[in-house]
Image: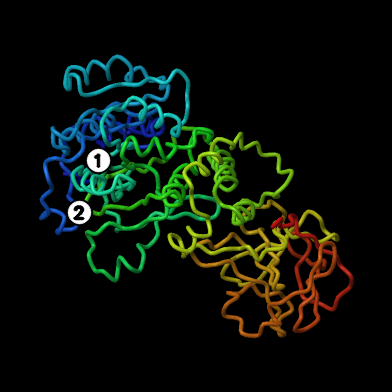
Amino acid sequence: GGLPATVKPTEEDKAKYLKEKYGYNAYLSDRISLDRTIPDHRPSKCTKVTYPRDLPQIAIIFIFVNEALSVILRSVHSAVNHTPAHLLKEIILVDDNSDDEQLKAPLEEYVNKRYPGLVKIVRNQKREGLIRARIEGWKAATAEVTGFFDAHVEFTAEPVLARIKEDRKRIILPSIDNIKHDTLEVERYENSGHGYNWELWCMYISPPKQWWDDGDISAPISTPAMIGCSFVANRVYFGELGLLDSGMDVYGGENIELGIRVWLCGGSMEVLPCSRVAHIARMKKPYHSNIAFHTRRNALRVAEVWMDEYKSNVYLAWNIPMENHGIDYGDISQRVALRKSLNCKSFQWYLDKVYPEMRRYNNTLFYGEIRNSKVNNLCMDQGMKENHTATLHPCHGWGPQIGRYTKEGQLFLGPLGSTGEDTRCVVDDQLSRFPQLLNCDKVTNVQQKTWDFSQNDSIVNRATGRCLEVVQANVYFGHVLVLAPCSGQKWTIKNTMKQ
């Protein structure tokens, strides 16, 4: 019943091999019933609702590449078992060019015999990636509503279909529970909205204040974007809205782009606690090993098409120069034309109305690695968080070394906070020899956290007149960052913000 399962000691070698192959315990999956029951994690109020019979029919679309056969079959069984027959028009399996033989004839023979006429299999002739594979699934569908899923085990259709019947411009996300990759136990996740940071990595966020104030945990949760493992939309409306951006590669960012687009262009997106999917959290992803490479490229497409003057935040988060960055994000002219034809609102409206939790960093003048001309291989770094001290470290340009100098003269160091705890700023507390790294809002003496700086010049504190300087020391990297009388040392911050 969705409880943890284990493997006998004699079977551990085979289980380990399959776990490494699939990113989850496929050996165990092969031994668990395809019709296993799992706990019902919906709020109790959901079970008391009765839904009309005349809801729109759904096509349930599963995308897979080299997935364990038993996981796919359990998803198909689950879709059939949990969806009233008169509402389930078709199940579409999109094979994104798997090379596993089990997923060819054995899969076809099984579904054709067990569910004749219900299951369609679409085979991509080359590996397209999740985004374009989902579009292929949509093309094959004929039902009024399309649901897109990764490997999942339960989906309650009626609440979703009822919400879409009320308003075809809603994109609905079932609440997500977790299937542990080692024991396949179903673990309940709390009700959440789906948000993201400025790199466009998705994450769970707290539902909006209004939802908490209303006090109904079964109510839909308005959400700025989606995690992406499952969503349901009216088929024709999804087409009118522009599907997913097929100019993106593999996956990463398309889930954020769809959330932004549906809100800006007259629709909405919501998480539904009365419908849940359980999702296997794989140890490794089936697609490209360097997913950050694709997410970065895709994020720039989103920024350039949808974010107006706020696109600079994406460049800042990834520490990419706004010009001559060398990243080919492809042709965006069709997506720009789509935005125009749908008469979409501004990104400012979206930040104000839909995602007010998202911090905006448009007061930035310079960003990126901060280097001193004296030791060009070391960069300013946030160091160990608990030390609250800015340090030096060999340059790598990732989050801990993203500096940001603002119009107000403040110098921040570390990855952008976006919606979480924000980046700290460099402070001269007038006592220490070392620059402090503190929560800027809590530093009441404004001058202590204000610095005079222009490119290739000193960084001078307004409270003390002391400079950030690099001095030789008997430490691991040979130099330390200190506050000292100015000796004319020069600093540069890698990128200039183009407003």
Q: Horizontally, is 31 left or right of 244 in the view?
A: left
Q: Relative to 239, is 399 on the left or the right? A: right
Residue situated in front as seen by the camera: 457 or 381: 457
> How far across and how far down the image is residue 190, in percent?
29, 58
Q: Position of residue 357 (x, y in %)?
A: 46, 65
Depth check, front residue: 446 or 27 = 446
- Amino acid at the residue labelled 1: Thr
Answer yes or no: do the residues labelled 2 and 1 have beta carbons within 8 Å? no
Residue assigned mark 1: 6
- Residue 42 is labelled as 2
Locate residue 259, reporting x and y percent.
Answer: 43, 49
Whole-number angstrom distance, CA of label 2 to CA of label 1: 26 Å
Picture coordinates of residue 176, whole percent (x, y):
30, 49
Q: Quadrant of the N terminus?
A: top left
Q: Indicate whether 316 appears above or below 430.
A: above
Q: 10 Å neighbourhood of mark 1: few (<14), some, or many (≥20)?
A: few
Give the amino acid type for the residue marked by disc 2 in the picture: Arg
At horizontal 72% and vertical 63% (from top left) the residue drawn is: 365
